[in-house]
Image (cartoon, rainbow, N blue to C red):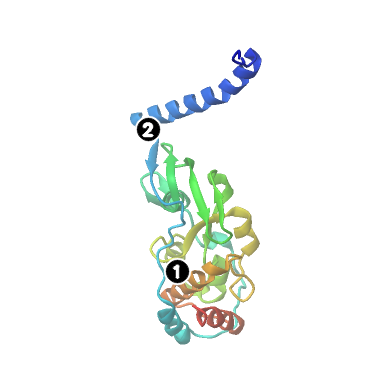
Amino acid sequence: MPRSVMPRSAASRLALPRLARRLATAVTTCALAAGLLTATTGTAQAALPTPVSAATARSYLASLTVAVENRTGYNRDLFNHWITISGACNTREWILKRDGSNVVTNSSCAATSGTWFSPYDGATWTNAADLDIDHLVPLAEAWGSGASGWTSTKREQFANDITRPQLIAVTDNVNQAKGDQDPATWLPSVVSYRCTYVRAWVQVKYYYGLSVDTAEKNALTSVLNGC
């Protein structure tokens, strides 16, 4: 039987996307070789520093002061955030590199490609613009539970803390929905991540000497008891 032949116009349409992908790969490869871009490898899992165990978190929580929050006077600008962490990388860019897989950045440290997994909602993203860097303990929450009395230097440390489990790359609209809520009114929709989340929350509050309110403590206790 005669071999079927694809019409030239259809073949051209199929060839163009393949050609575009090959050209994009070649450009990226050349840029990497020239040092214009850098790549890091990872697991596409947000690499939040491992929080303390549930037992330790329960011990920490028991020692925290219980007090009514007072957010009077809060202003986000009082927490100088996204400072330079390393080279050309500010805090946001540093966390995007840490939390992503196969992240490619340009000379300004902006992520141009990569893969990111958001543990709050289980979504995977390939565009850095779809991600926010969440302050796990929100800045307003910190202010209302003790940070209003801190120095500006300590508030800057808190807002850019890459050592404690305080910063993580997550889906932007999920972070925006969380806003400045504490665990009494907001927890990640991925139930299996809630234990990690509250362990991290308690560790950060304990390290910085922040208080908890009654509803917050009850919610934290409930989750920790199931860890």
Furthest-front residue in view? Answer: 1
Crowd around label 2: few <14 · some 14–19 · many ≥20 (10 Å): some
Dot 1 lies on which element?
A: loop
Q: Is residue 124 found left or right of 51 in the rendered image?
A: right
Which residue is the site of mark 1?
151
- Closer to the camera, 40 or 176? 40
Q: Nearer the viewer, mark 1 or mark 2?
A: 2
Rounded to the nearest angstrom, the CA distance separating label 1 from label 2 is 42 Å
Measuring from the top left, give residue 139's x and y in whole percent.
Answer: 54, 66
- Closer to the camera, 45 or 106? 45
- Closer to the camera, 51 or 4? 4
Which residue is the site of mark 2?
32
Q: Quadrant of the N terminus?
A: top right
The answer to whether residue 178 is above or below residue 203 is above
Measuring from the top left, give residue 192's x and y in whole percent.
Answer: 53, 68
Inspect this view and state whether residue 137 appears.
Answer: no
Q: Is residue 70 found left or right of 40 in the rendered image?
A: right
Look at label 1 and name its amino acid. Thr
Question: Which residue is rendered at x = 43% and y = 40% of the image?
Answer: 104
Crowd around label 1: few <14 · some 14–19 · many ≥20 (10 Å): few
Question: Which residue is rendered at x = 57% and y = 74% of the image?
Answer: 144
Residue 219, quarter of the rendered image: bottom right
Residue 199, which numbered label?
none
Question: Which residue is rendered at x = 46% and y = 70% of the image?
Answer: 200
Residue 213, quarter of the rendered image: bottom right
Mark 1 vs mark 2: which is more N-terminal?
2
